[in-house]
Image (tube, coloured by chain):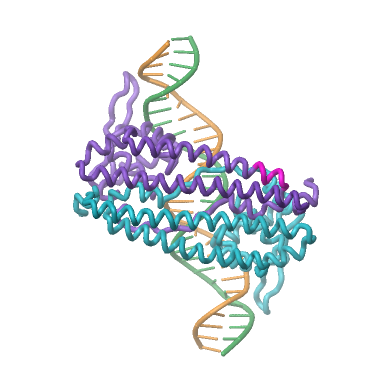
Chain colours: A purple, B cyan, C orange, D green
Amino acid sequence: VTLRLALLAILTAEPMTGWDLVKYFDGTVAFLWRAPHSQIYPQLRKMEEEGLIEAEVVPRGEHAEKRIYRISDLGIAELKRWASEPLPVRPQRDPQRLHANYFEWGSFEAARVQLGEHLDHYTAALRDWERFSEDLEARRVPLLRRRLESRPREEHEAIVAFKLFAFGGEISRAKMEIAWAKEGLALLDRLEAAGAKLTGDAIALP
Amino acid sequence: VTLRLALLAILTAEPMTGWDLVKYFDGTVAFLWRAPHSQIYPQLRKMEEEGLIEAEVVPRGEHAEKRIYRISDLGIAELKRWASEPLPVRPQRDPQRLHANYFEWGSFEAARVQLGEHLDHYTAALRDWERFSEDLEARRVPLLRRRLESRPREEHEAIVAFKLFAFGGEISRAKMEIAWAKEGLALLDRLEAAGAKLTGDAIALP
DNA sequence: GTAGTCATGTAAGAGGTTACATGATTAG
DNA sequence: CTAATCATGTAACCTCTTACATGACTAC
C-alpha cells in the first residue's frame, strides 16, 4: 500500500509519465523508498483503473506514445486518508543484525568484511542524505519547488520541516549504523587478540 | 534465505519440533526475526527435502505424531557458508519515515498520534531488548546455555559477545527511534504554535 | 467437560526482486 | 550511425501476511 501512496504524493507536484516516476524512485525519492520500473508501471495501471490517477495519452515523435499521469480528486482523498490514519508500527526484520548474531559460524575475516561493507554503505548513505537535506533546506530540490508553488505560503514551512524531519531520521539511522559497525570491528580485534575461537573456524568447510 | 538460516541456527542448539521453533520465533528470537507458523512448517518440509535437516517422527500419545528436526552435516555446512559470505547490504524501506515525510497531508493530531505510537513501540522494545541483553550476558537464556554446552569453552566468549553485539544494535536503533519521535513531537508543537497550516487541514475530507 | 497447550498444516493475495523483452527518439 | 535516453511492459520466483482449518493431549 505504500508504493501507491508514494506515487500519489509525487504526482501532487505535477503530472508526469511512468518513466519520470521511475527516475524519482531511482534518484531522490530512493532515499526513503525505492522501486524498480517492473513494480511501478503495473501499479500505475492499477491505480488508473481504480480512478486514483488519470492518464493522458500523448504522442511521442511519429510512432510512439506516452502516458502522462495526473492525480485525481479521489487520489488526493486517498493520500489524505493514508496520512490521517495511524500507520501500524511493524517490527523490522534486519538480515544484517541476524548475520552478526551468528558471526561465530564464520571467521573473523568474514565478519570484518561484512562490517566493513556495512560501514561503507552507511558512510556513503550518510553523505548522500546530508547533502540532500541541505538541498531540501535551501529549497534547491526541483520536485519540492514545484510542490511549494502549488501551495499557499503558510504551508511551506511545515512541508519543508516534515521532509527535513523524515530525512533527519535516516541520517540518525546512518550514524547509528556507522557507530555499530565500528564497535563491531573493535570487538573483533579484541576477541581475536584475546585468542577467542569461533565455531566456524573450528571445522573446515567441505 | 534468511528464515532458513535462522531455523538452522536454532537447531544447532538441540533437535526440536516445528512447534518449538514457532515458539522461539514468537518469543526470544522474535527480537531479531519473526515468522508465523504458516511460514515455518512449509519451510521445514522444504529444508528436509533438501537434506539440510532430518526429521524423526515420534508418536505423541496414542493417535498423534510429531516431527523432531535435527540439523544435518549439510545444514551445518550451509549455515557456515552463509556466515562466511558477505551479506549484501540492501537499503531498508521504512514506511514510518515515508509517512512522516508526508505529514502535511494529514493533521497535527494525526501526526501526534503516529509519533506517540512510534515512541510507545520503541520504548517497549527497548525495555524488552535491554532485559534480554542482561539475560544473555548472565547466560540465563536456555537456548544459549544449550548452545554453549555443545561447544568448547574457548568459543563461549565470542558466541555471547556476538549476540550482545547484535542486540546492542537493536538497542541503539530503539534509542534512536525514541529520540526521533520526541524530536518530531517537539517539531509539531513548534509548528502549531507558530500558526503553520497543513495541506490536509486546508481541504476537508469527503 | 473444558480450557490451554501442543502440533501441523493449506491458501489467497500483496509486495518485492531479477530477468527477459522491445522499440522509439535524440544528441553527437 | 551509434550511444544514451526515453518509454513501457511481462514473467518467474520468493517472501510475508492473514485467514482458514483441524485435532490430540493434559491439567483442572
Q: Is residue B13 left or right of residue A5?
A: right
Report the front residue among A105 and A7.
A105
Q: Residue at x 59, y 47 (%)?
A: A181
Q: Nearer the viewer, residue B118 or B150?
A: B118
Residue A95 x/y as whole percent = 58, 50
- For the residue pair A113 and C12, the one nearer the viewer reads as A113
- Left or right placement of residue B177 versus residue B23 in this view: left
Please tell me whether residue B26 is drawn above or below residue A95 in the rendered image.
Answer: below
B166 on left or right of A85: right
Residue A22 seen in this snapshot:
yes
The relative height of residue A31 versus residue D7 in the rendered view (above or below) is below
Q: Is residue D22 above or below residue A45?
A: below
Q: Position of residue D27 (x, y in %)?
A: 61, 86
Q: Main secondary structure of the magenta part?
A: helix
Magenta residues, start to end: A107-113
B95 within the magenta span: no
Residue at 32% x, 46% y: name it.
A161
Residue at 43%, 48% (x, y): give it: A169
